[in-house]
Amino acid sequence: MDYEIIVVGAGHAGCEAALGASRKGHKTLLITGNINNVADMPCNPSIGGSAKGIVVREIDALGGEMGRNADKSLLQIKMLNGSKGPAVRALRAQADKITYPKNMLKTLKETVNLTLYEGLVADILTENNKVKGVSLEDGTMFTSEIVILTTGTYLNSDILVGSTRRREGPHEERPSNKLSDNLAKKGFPIIRLKTGTPPRIAKDSINYSETKLEPGDDKYYTFSFDNKIYYDIDKQEPCYLIYTTKETHKIILDNLNKSSMYGGLNDIKGIGPRYCPSIEDKVTRFRDKERHQLFLEPESLYYDDIYIQGFSSSMPYDVQEKMVHSLPGLKNAKILKYAYAIEYDAIYPTCMKASLESKILENLYTAGQINGTSGYEEAAGQGLIAGINASLKLEGKEPLILKRNESYIGVLIDDLITKGIKDPYRLLTSRAEYRLLLRSDNADLRLREYGYKVGLVSEEDYQKLLRKKEEINKLIRELKTVKLTPKDNAYLEKVTVPLKDGISLYNLLKRPEIDINYLKKYFSNYEEEILSIVNTEIKYEGYIKKATLEAEKMLEMESKKIPEDIDYDKIHNLASEAKEKLKEVRPTSLGQALRISGVNPADVSILMIYLKKEHK
Amino acid sequence: MDTTIAAISTAQGIGAISIIRVSGKDAFKIVSKIFSNKNFKDAPSHTIHYGYIVDNGEKIDEVLVTKMCSPKTFTTEDIAEINAHGGITTTNKILELLLTNGCELATPGEFTKRAFLNGRIDLTEAEGIMDLINSKTPEAREMALNQVQGKVSNLITDLRDDLASIIANIEVNIDYPEYEDIEEMTTLKIKEKLGLLKTKINKILKQSNTGEILKTGIKTAIIGRPNVGKSSILNCLVGEEKAIVTSIQGTTRDSIEASVVIDNIILNLIDTAGIRETEDLVESIGAKKSLKIIDEVDLVLFVVNYNEKLTLEDKKILAKLQDKNYITIVNKADLEKHIDDENLKNKVYVSALKDENIEGIGEKVKELFNLEQIETSDLTYLTGARNKAILNKVLKSISDVETGVKNNYPIDMIEIDLRNIWNLLGEITGETYDEELLDQLFSRFCVGK
C-alpha cells in the first residue's frame, strides 16, 4: 500500500478530510488538480452565516481547521441575528480569498503524514467490491486502503454563459472528465446539479456615494474556541448595500431568452438551488417586486475584485455589462470577471451511510458537493466527518455519527442520507428541529468531547473544556444558593417588580426583564462567556426542556435498530411506496425510517412487529 | 411504548353503555386525575370502583372503573376500564379528558399490538393484527380524504397555510438577516394573527359538536309527571310516517329503545318502557325516576299539561333541568289554557291527541343545538375525540405563544410553539412534511446570492 487514505480534491471538504486523517496518524495523500488552488473560494468571499456559522464552530469543536483558518483570514466579522434569540445567532465573516487558501496550504504542508500531489483522478481501483486505490488521467496509480472523494463541482463540469457551454471547472480550472462516468459504471446513481456566481467588478470603479455602508460588528469575535487570534476591530473592511433598478429589470426581461437558463441553451439538465436563485429567476419569479437587494463585498486585500452578492447570472457578456451599469454606483464599473452558471455531476446521497461511507463500494467515502450539498461550510463539515470515520475504520473502531439533537453537521448528514435531495442542499436553521440545543455558544460543550475521543483535540484544549463546564456548574449552584429578599428591592425595582418574599437568583433570572449582568454584584466573578451561556440556559429553561424531551423521544426511536441485512420483500403487508423507499434508503433505525417521506407511522409499526418476530 | 393509550372500546352510537380502555404505565395516575373515587389509585388489582368522572369539579358521568394491574392484563400493562353510561357526547368528553391529561389516542389495533410486543399473545394472532393495521390504512386514508374535502378541513388547511406563511417569514428573517427589504415578523403581529386563529378554532370546535350530534343522534328522554301525555307524544314521534324506529337490546343499566328522526335530526329515546309505566304509577315514584334519568341524557323533552296549572312536582323537575338542554312540550294545547307558562323556556305547543305541531319539536331541537343553518346534504364535519383533543392542544399552544409574547421572548422561541401548532393542525389534515415549509419560504421570498 502506498497510502492508508487517499483524498481526491482539495477544496473545503478535502482539506478537512486530509487534515483529520493525517492528524490522526494515518499516512494520507491529497490529490488536487492545482496545488495553488487548495481551499479555493470560487463563489462568495465569506465563511459562516445563519446555521453555517454554527457549523464552523462545530468543526472547530471537533478539532477541524475551517474556523481557525477563517479567523486568520478575516476582512470583517458579524454576529447575525443579535437582536433575536440565542439559538439563532451565528457568525459570518468576510474572508480574504488570497489569505484563506494560502493559510490552508501552509497548514497542509506543515502536517506530518500528509502528502500533496497534483493530478486528476480518473478511476477508483477496486478488488472484490472494495477500494484498492486510484488511477490518474495520466496513468499514474496509487494504492490505498481507503479513498475519500471530495471533488466539488469538478465532475464533468460545464461553465454556462449565454448560449455557450464550455467543459471547464471554476476559474478556468481543468474539470474531471472521467471519474463521474467510471463511478456510474460501478453502479453509483449520478445526478446533475447546477449553481451560479455573480460578476466581479473593480474596487475603484465604484461610486461609493450611491451605496450604503455595511461595516463589521464593533465587538470582538472568533470562530475558534481556543485559538483566539487578535484583529483590529476598527480596521475591518466594509461591505456596501445597493438595490437593482427598474432599468436593470427591463434589461433582464428584454434579454431573457439570451440567458443560458431561459433559452440561451436548450440542453440544461442540472437542477439549481432554490435558495440561491439567479437574478433572472428573481426578476421573473417576483415580477411585482420593484427592487432587489445586492451587496458589494470585497474579495481580498491583495487584488481589486468586488463581488456583487445577489446578482448571479448566466447572461452573455454584453448583457451583463448593461445590467451591471444600470446599478446605482456602478454606472462606470469595470467588470473583472463575468458571472456564469456551472453544471456538474453529483452522487445521489441516499447511497451513503451515516458514516459517509458508500453502501455500494466498501472503503469509499464521499463528502461535500459530490454528495449534493452546496456551501463551503457544509462541505467542510462533511469532509471532517469523512476523514474521522475513514480513520476510525482503519483503526477498527465504530464510526462517529452525530445525532440531530447534537449538531447541525448531524442534521445535514441525516437529511442527505434519509431524504435525498432535489436541488443542492443548503443548511438552514429551520432544518434543525432542536435548534435551541444547537447554539453557536455551546458547540464546544456539545462536541469537543467527541473531538478529544477521536484524537483531534489536544489534552490542553480538552482540559480547558472541563474547566469551562465546571465553571458553568459552579455558577448555576451559586445562583441557586444565593437568595435575595425584599431588602434588595431598592436595587431591583429599577428593572423589575419588587420582591414580596425571598427568591433565589436562579429563579429571579427567569424573569424576562432581568439580565444576568444586572445581578453580578450578588455572586462571584465569572467570564462573560460563562455568564452568557448560563443566562440563556436559565432564561429559556422551559423551551430547552421541551426541546430536550422531544429529542429524547426521537432518540428512543433511534435506539431501535434495523439489521443491515433486512429483506423488505419478506414483509408482505408493507405499503408498496414505503417498501420502495425503505429499500432505497435502508435506514439503520426505526427513528430514521420515520423521517423518510413516504413511510408513514403505520408502516413503521408493521416494521417494528416484523423485527420483534425475527428476533425471537 | 412509554406512552399510555386510550380509546373507546365499544361501538359508538349503538350501546348506551360504553367502555373506555386505558393502557400503559400512567393509566392509574391519569384516571385518578379525573375520577372522584380517591381510593382508586391505591386499590388492589382486579377490582371495580364506583364514582364520578369530574372535570374541574364538574361531574361528567357516573361510572364504574375496573382496575387491572400489570402483568396480568390483556396488554400486560396497567389497564383501567371506565364503564360509562352517558351518551355519545359524554363518552367522547371522557376520552377527551383522558387525552388532555396525558393519554395518547390508541391507533387501530394498538392494544393488540402491545399485547403481542409484550409477549402476551402469540405470532399467529399478531399476524392477524398486522393485516388489520394494514387493512385499516386505506380506510383511514379514505376517511382523511373525505375530511380533507370537507368544509372544516378546508378551513384548517387555510389556517395552517396562514401559519406557514408566518413561520416562513420568521425563518427567512433568521436565515437571511441581511435582507432588510423583507418584512420583519414581530411578536405583536403574531399575537394579532393568533387571536384570529383562536376565534376560528373555537368556532370549529363548536361546529364539531354539532357534526357529532348530526351523525350519531342525541340521547333523549321524555320526562314529566303522570298523565301529561308522555306516551301520546312518544306515539306521535315514533308513529310518524317518516320516522324510523329501531329496537336495540338494552344492556345492564339502560337502553335506547327507539331512534326517531325528526327533520333530519336523530333522537335516541331512552326508557320508553318507563314512560308507559309511570303514567300508571303513584306520583312520587315517577318523579324520582325522572330525576335520575335526567342525568343520563343529552336532551330532555319535558312534557307539561296546557290544561292544568304547574304542580309542585313540575317545578321540582324544572329545577333539576336548569343546567340541561331541554325543551318544554306544552301538550293538550287544543284544550282550554290553565297553565302559567311565563317562566317556561324553549316552549313548543302541541296536541298529541290531534297530532298537531309535532314537527315543532324538531325545530326547537335545531334551535337549541344551533343546527338551523346546517344543510344536511353537506355533512362533512370535524368529528371524533382525537381531532378535538388536537384542537384543544392547539389552543394550549396558542396560550403558550401569548405568554411568550407577554414575556418578550425572542421570536425564534415563539416560533417553536407556532411550529408546534402547525404540526398539530397537520395531524388533522394528514400533512406534516417539513419540506412544505421550505417550499413556502423560497416561493414567497426572494433571497440568495
Image (tube, coloured by chain):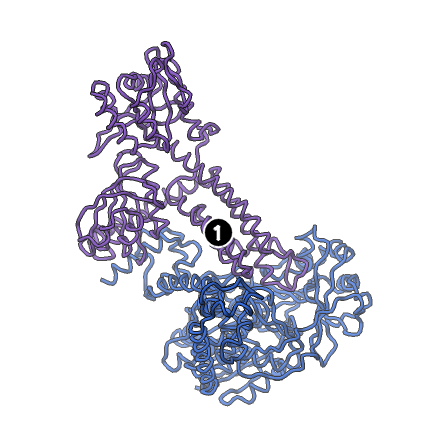
Name above or below for residue A60 compared with residue B120: below
Mark 1, other Cα within 10 Å: few <14 / some 14–19 / many ≥20: some
Residue B202 can be seen in this image: yes
Residue B246: % across, % down: 27, 25
The residue tagged 1 is: B399
Q: Which chain is purple?
A: B
Subunit of mark 1? B
Task: Name the outermost residue toward the front.
Answer: A487
Q: Amino acid at mark 1?
A: Ser
- The residue lying toward the viewer, choosing from A25 and A183, is A25
**Figure quadrant of residue B139:** top left
Name above or below for residue B85 compared with residue A209: above
Name above or below for residue A244 compared with residue A4: above
Residue A179 can be seen in this image: no
Residue A264: % across, % down: 69, 58
Residue A315: % across, % down: 71, 61
Q: Dividing the image into 4 quarters, which one contains the N terminus of chain A?
A: bottom left
- The residue lying toward the viewer, choosing from A524 and B55, is A524
Task: Name the outermost residue toward the right.
Answer: A332
Image-based side of A515 in relation to A339, left or right = left
| Residue in the picture at 58% in, 62% down | B174
Question: Which tint was used for chain A?
Answer: blue
| Residue in the picture at 39% in, 17% down | B349
Image-based side of A5 in relation to B305, left or right = right
Residue B353: % across, % down: 32, 11
